[in-house]
Structure formats: C-alpha cells, structure tokens
Amino acid sequence: MGIMTAAVATTAAEVIRTPAEIRRARVLGILYLVMAAFVYLVFTLGVESGSVATFGLSRPTDTVSVPDAMVGVRPLTTLIAVIFAFLGATQLARGFGKKANVVLGVVFGLFILAFLAWAAADGKFSLVGMLNATVVQAVPIALGALAGVLCERVAVINIAIEGQLLGGAFVGGVVGSATNIWLGIFSAMVTGVLLGWVLAVLSVRYRVDQIISGVFINIFVLGLTSYLTSRILVEIPDLNNSGRFLPIKIPLLGDIPMIGPIFFDNNIFVYGMFLAVIVLQYGLFKTRWGLRSRSVGEKPKAADTVGINVYRMRYLNVMLGGVVAGFGGAFFTLGSAGRFEENMTAGLGFIGLAAMIFGRWKPVGALGAALVFGFADSLAGKLAILQTPIPSEFLLMAPYVATIVVVAGIVGRARPPAADGQPYIKE
C-alpha cells in the first residue's frame, strides 16, 4: 500500500506543472516545429539534389588517419527536419518533463549538424579541426566561468572577470617577454590574485555594491593596459614578444583517432582547464572547504553560527578565483597570440559569466557551457573559410548571440546561491 501511494504521488508530481513550465513547454514545442520547417525549406531545398558533404575526421599530421565521412545533404537534413517535427509535436502534447533540457541539447546538436551539412555541400569540412578549435576557444571562457563559480559560491558576484583576464594577459605578456613564459604565467596569476583582493576588500570589508566594484575594476584595467600599451609596448617592442606555449602531445593518448588530436595534443592551458574543472568539482562537492563555501553562499548567518568565518571564506574564494582568472588571462598572450593587444579579451569575461549561469554554478556545467560558446566562435571561423553566403558580420556575432540565448533563459531558469550579492554584517 505504501509503495502504491508513493508511486501515485510521484506520478502526480510529474503531471502537475507550474504555469511557467507549461509556458516554456509550449514555447519549446513551437520552436522545434519552426526549426523543422526552417531546416527543410533552407537546408534541404536550398541545395541541389545529389549534393554530398564531406567531413574530415583526421588531420594531415595525425599518426592514425581516419577516412573522411561523406553524407548526402538532402537525406540527412530531411531526416533531421522530421525528427524536429516529431519532438515539437510531442513537446506540445505532453512535454518531456525533466528531460526537456536533454531534448533541447539534442535539437541544438542536430541543427548544427544540418547546418554544417548545408554549408559543406559539395565541399569538405574539417570536423576534427573545428572541434579542436572549439576546445581551445573555450579555455578563457571556461576559466573565467570557474573564477565566477568560486566567487559566487560564497555569495560574491564577480563582474571583474573581464578585468582579471585582461590584466593577466598584459602582465603575463610583459613578464614573459622580459624573462620567460613560465614566469609570465606566474605573474599573470599573481595579477589575478591582486585584483581579486581588491574586489574582496571593496565587496566584503567595505560592502560596496558588488556590481559597481566589478565594473570599476574592469574600467580601471582596460584604461591602464591601454595607456601602458601605447606608452611602453609600442616604444619597446621587445617587451611585447613573449612567444607562446606549443602543444604537448601525450604519448599513446594523442594517437587515438579523432579524440587524441582534440583532447591530448594541446598546450598546457587546455590541460590546465580540464584539471581545474576536475579539482574544483571535487573540491566544492566532496571536501570540507567546499561544504563551507556553499554554506556561506546559501546561509551565511547559519554558517557563522556554527563557527565558520564568513569573511575569511569570502576572501579566500575570491582570491582563488583571481588565480584561475589570471591563468585564463595568460592564455591570450602566452597560449594564443604570443603578444598583447589592446582589449584583446573582447568581452570573453562576460561570456564566462553567462557560461557560469548556463552551467548552474557548477564547474562541470561551466565547462560544458564554455564548450558551447567556443563551438560558436570556432564555427564562425570555419564557415568563413567555406565562403558560405552568410555575411561575415553575422558569423562574428555567433558567440554573442549564443550568450543572449542563454541569458534569455531558453535553457530554463537557474537558481543562484541564496545569498548571492548580499553583503554580510556580523552581529
């Protein structure tokens, strides 16, 4: 009898939906049907019958070569349009419940596949090259998002990620040019810590509005780096020629077809990104430090009652976030360009904030979101090579459009830590 009651209660919980959930289900259902019509009318009828798209599954330098994949564009896009129509009808009829975001992810992936097939019709597209570029482009976004996770888990909003990335890029590039690139990385991380300390002092000790504190740091770093670039780096070019870290191929793993070139043949920033995600995911949810951090972010008064120093935890986490952001900033000069350019972060710190929200304040989720944004960025570059009829300006907008879609809440409403952004006053 008890088992039957529990089953009935579970079923009722699944059936009863809030008005917001019903509204979102309808929106998604209509969206899937519109996408089905769009895929068929543009991607299917927009190419000639018999067109074939070729996807490269290996690079010329790979040890193990994989044959290219060739698919008919019209059959593939027609099948995807039918799948979209089925999912849309199902979404409108009964919805997918807790699997709605999974279905949304599948739809997104299939739409990208249809788009790539259309773009590569009667041509060749290096799929492995694009996926490798996706991982590389995701590095500063993921590290910025991790810095945000560390801060917001203790209820400090870090709008200053952009400034920390830019400051780390500048100092890392200059020190790397004057000494060596390893000291450049260290100095970039120290710069991130110092900017994190400033944010902590303003937000925790003096209880300045955290948004204003972050904006102040961003504007200060942008102005200072621009001034120093024009006054020093332009006149002394040797201080802006740091070089960069070359890819390090992991033996055996780097030779795995498709997977090896993407994950195991990259520079230390890519490996550092994955290591940081693993360490922080474990630390936040499996250690005493993580439990204390989350308690400070959710119920600081209760945490203080049981003996946790709220101020100390906030200082610690904000400065640790600075370490991660500084390392991410060094990627721009020491892992990518080999030199510093004014405002070279180009708003990626703010995209990192969107990735943090998309990832629901979890390190693994932040990485997944960063890969989505990195994919949008790398896709724009690859499509420019294919000379698609899409204007280049629209291709450059891709990562920012993806940010707007995420922030607009199409992936569902995310709940931040309960005390996020609220200063704590010890009684």
Image: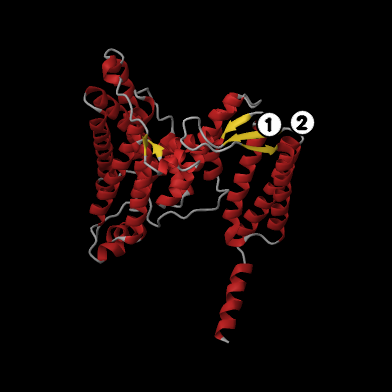
Residue at the extreme top: 235
Distance CA(mark 2)–CA(mark 1):
9 Å
Q: Which of the 4 image quarters holds residue 81? A: top right
Tell me, yes or no, whether the two marked residues, 2 and 1, touch with CB atoms within 8 Å. yes
Q: Residue type at mark 1?
A: Ala
The numbered mark at residue 302 is none
Horizontal and vertical percent position of residue 261: 45, 38
Q: Which of the 4 image quarters holds residue 44? A: top right
Horizontal and vertical percent position of residue 262: 46, 39
The residue lying at 45 percent from left, 52 percent from top is 360
The residue lying at 69 percent from left, 43 percent from top is 35
The numbered mark at residue 121 is 1
Q: Residue type at mark 2?
A: Glu
Query: Does residue 200 lie above or below 390 as drawn?
Result: below
The residue lying at 35 percent from left, 24 percent from top is 338
Q: Secondary structure at mark 1?
A: loop
Q: Is residue 158 visible?
A: no
Query: Does residue 174 lie above or below 210 as drawn?
Result: above
Query: Does residue 349 lie above or below 420 as drawn?
Result: above
The numbered mark at residue 48 is 2
Query: Does residue 165 lie above or below 174 as drawn?
Result: below
Is 287 in front, or is 310?
A: 287
Image quadrant containing the N terminus: bottom right
The residue lying at 46 percent from left, 55 percent from top is 415
